[in-house]
Image: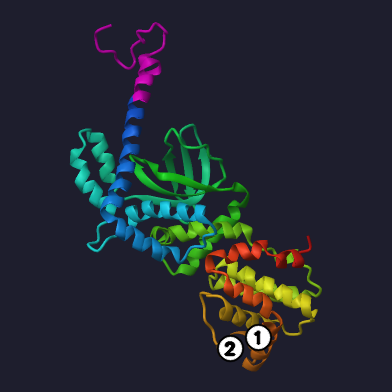
Amino acid sequence: MNGKIGRNDPCPCGSGKKYKKCHGAKETVSINQVLENELLNLQRQIIDFALFNFESELLEDYEFQREMLIILDETEEEFYEFIHKFWFTSFEPLDDGKTIMEYFISQQVLKIKRPRLQEILRSWADPELVAGKIAAVEENHLVIEDTLRQERFTVNLFEMMKDYEKGAYVFAILLPFGENYYPFPNCFDLPHESLAAYEKFVKKEFALSGYEDEKEFLIDYFLELMNHAPEAAEKIEIDAFDWKHDSNRKVAYMFEEEMENIGELRPFIDAGIILWAEFCRRTNKRIQNPSIYVAALQYLMSMVVPTSYSYTQKELAEKYGVSANSISARYNEMFDLLEDEIDKLMLVPLNRKWNLFHKSPLISRLLLC
């Protein structure tokens, strides 16, 4: 009993099993638990280090990033400010080109006695991130298939982490652990019911971005993708409106397609569709040339909300093959008729517009249901 026990020797407990399958396995589990606790502690130290040494840089960058986010309440504000710390620490270079993570590693790695832990910490200088579906769920890890790269990442889960569902869509910053990864700090999942919509959204955003490298795109747009992805599943359905004429519905579809093609934010697309539906309700017009109204609606939206594009009436006339005068006339007609609704829209801050249009009396008035 006092000699060294081989892994393939009978377990001294008398179970009849090999030591590696009995108490040896429990010993391995215990070692892995110790290592996991040390990794989790290191993650906490990294953020403490970032806040202590680079708080002003973190705050300044978050204020910049926040302009691109749609935040509806204080809980969401806290969530994105929290996630930003991990993203900024992992990927954003400071003035000298080094990340906060690299600073932490250089200062801490030689203080660690365990060689395996030193090796793991050094590998964290090259973190990963994913936006993709959960392809498999095992007892203590996930397999995530990244949407853009079609690569699979095996992600170990810390013991206190919640259960995940196969088919859910997740965003995650990942720190290497040999061939696997640990989340930093967690995997943030969206319901599996809208998986296809999330995948389509991420692919489309990449296609519109002009980036050639998928990882570079994910790094630069990680927070925005997390923030805007739910819109892909929550968008207003055009056929849900009570269109009196098919030509009116056609204008809505043409407008939606054009705005999606230029990468407009979903809340602004929906706002345009809602305003158009209200215009149709008030006028009951039959549209002879949908292109004129699509161009006029696009111009109207650029005048009342901070859209990502800016076209003159002349440019829109050339784009749609209509006259600038006809666009001007239809724009003035829509603005005059919808001025009350437009005033409400212009008075609402950007980060509340999505909430406004999905919970306003205008929606109830326009939808079939």
- The answer for how far apart the CA atoms under marks 1 and 2 are is 10 Å
Give the residues in magenta: 1-30
Q: Is residue 259 above or below residue 359?
A: below
In the image: residue 78, left or right of residue 367: left
Which of these two is toward me, 213 or 195?
195
x, y percentage for residue 253?
Answer: 68, 72
Name the mark on residue 307. Answer: none
Is residue 98 visible to the viewer in this orientation of the structure? yes
Q: Kindly tell me whether residue 247 is visible in this rendering.
A: no
Q: Position of residue 44 (x, y in %)?
A: 33, 42
Q: Is the residue 78 above or below the residue 176 in the image?
A: below
Q: Disc 1 on helix, strand or loop?
A: helix
Whether residue 311 is in magenta: the answer is: no
- 253 left or right, relative to 244: left
Dots 1 and 2: beta carbons under 8 Å?
yes
Residue linked to disc 2: 313
Disc 2 marks which amino acid?
Gln
Q: Residue sitting at 57 percent across and 91 percent down? A: 314
